[in-house]
Amino acid sequence: MKRIDKAYINGQFTELHGKQIFDLINPSNHEKIGEVILGDEIDTRNAIAAAKKAFKTFSKTNVVERIEILKNLKKAVEKREKELIDAMILEYGGTRQFCTIAYQNMVGAFDHMIETLQHFEFERKVGSTLVEMTSLGVVGIITPWNSSNSFICNKFATAVAAGCTVVVKPSEMSALQTQLIIECFHEAALPEGVFNVVNGLGNVVGNEIVNHPDIAKISFTGSTRTGKMIAKGAVDSMKRVTLELGGKSPNIILDDADFEKAIPQAVFGAYMNSGQACIAPTRLLVPQSRLEEVNQLAKEAALQVVVGDPANENTNVGPMVSEKQYERVQHYIQVGLDENAELLVGGTGKPEGLENGNFVKATVFTNVRNDMRIAQEEIFGPVLSIISYQNDEDAIAIANDTLYGLAAYVTSSDENRALKVASRIEAGRVCINGFKHDPLAPFGGFKQSGIGREFGAFGLEEYLEPKSILV
């Protein structure tokens, strides 16, 4: 069992003022695997002070220096591949399939920001005015428990590229993973105070970051509810915010698609990261005229989904991260039953033989109406809702009938037709014919799925302020 009892402040592992202990529990078997001492407001202020001091010099670094730092960070992360993947499987319950992709995203974050820097203009001529893109200041980074280190690597790489220093508040449930990434970054010999981490609760460390006047920007990934609280708190000191929040992503299968390929792909896609993914396509929109065929294909696919030990390479769905998350998903499955949605496969309770962990049956509801709670509310588990539509116009209307707008998916044998549908979907990212990720393209949400963008040049600009100099 590992005990984590220090913050990382000013380039050093630092004794904590906070005393509260948080137990780390393996979600696959409920065994205690570690504990973390949580920081408090004093620890957070110390971290902010270190970042503020470091910003004075780090903001003056040039592109060549920042690229060298990003290269060193990448090398350090590459040395710990197995440990980073194994820690995620153990502590989070992420499947080996997903955790391997998450690790690749960690490494890729540095490469893609290096590529962005090589083409980014920090000085621009606009009309007769010189516009300088200047570093914002100290950035408060608040990350969730699903793919925690991927978020930290991406956000910190962007901060480095912009010449900003950071204070990170990761999820307390990700402390083992966070400790590893801290060790990686420490080995990269960063300038003191550029990267600081305080484990702690949102209502303690998070609140201090949100309210502290020396934090210039907050980059947050998590729930819409928490994002709204952060936005309200940040406005008092006019902090800039990037908020990547919840989703209820539609997956439209047009009537000319190859259903034998598209439907199984849709089912497995809905269960990405065991369903604990904000971009998961959990609303499957299909033609009413082919609903019976879809139901059969979806049921066959769902029965092939492997729920079990996340360390096994063939596992598709691991445990929910915590008992609380397990109970949340169970609640929504019961809501679906109470709403008279038709249960195609799965349901309440744990899969046979997996009673000791937070495992949920791979569940599919059909004949779901879009006004049902299971179609409108983010469940964050392996639960798919099949919704039928009459025609393309109806499909678009159903897809857009949601508070969210993070991601969407369209499948068709006619790419031009799919493009026309995609252009009318109210979402920050729309994938056509499959699940794609372009780390140089902007990522973020419409509506209540967030504010601002991440990745590439669009993400970098979120960490910069344009200054107009008129000569």
Image: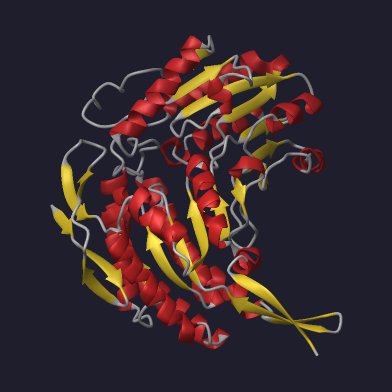
- In the picture shown, does residue 66 fall above or below 388? below
Q: Position of residue 144 (x, y in %)?
A: 41, 49
Q: Residue at x 58, y 69 (%)?
A: 463
Q: Tell me where residue 3 appears, x and y as whole percent.
A: 15, 57
Whether 323 is drawn above or below 167: the answer is: above
The residue lying furthest to the bottom in this view is 471
Give the residue at x 53% y 56%: 234
Q: State the image coordinates of residue 242 (x, y, percent, origin top left).
A: 57, 57
Give the tally of numbered discs: 0
Of residues 79 and 301, the one drawn nearer to the viewer in this rendering: 79
**Extreme right residue here?**
127
Describe residue 376's horizontal placement relative to residue 6 as left or right: right
Where's residue 274, x and y in %?
Answer: 41, 37
Question: Which image quarter is the C terminus in?
Answer: bottom right
State left or right for residue 388 relative to residue 73: right
Q: Residue at x 59, y 74 (%)?
A: 115
Instruction: Determine if residue 364 is in view.
Output: yes
Q: Position of 101 compared to 126: left or right? A: left
User: Residue 17 appears in which quarter of the rendering?
Assistant: bottom left
Seen from the viewer's position, the closer of residues 430 and 11 is 11
Camera-side residue of 274 and 215: 215
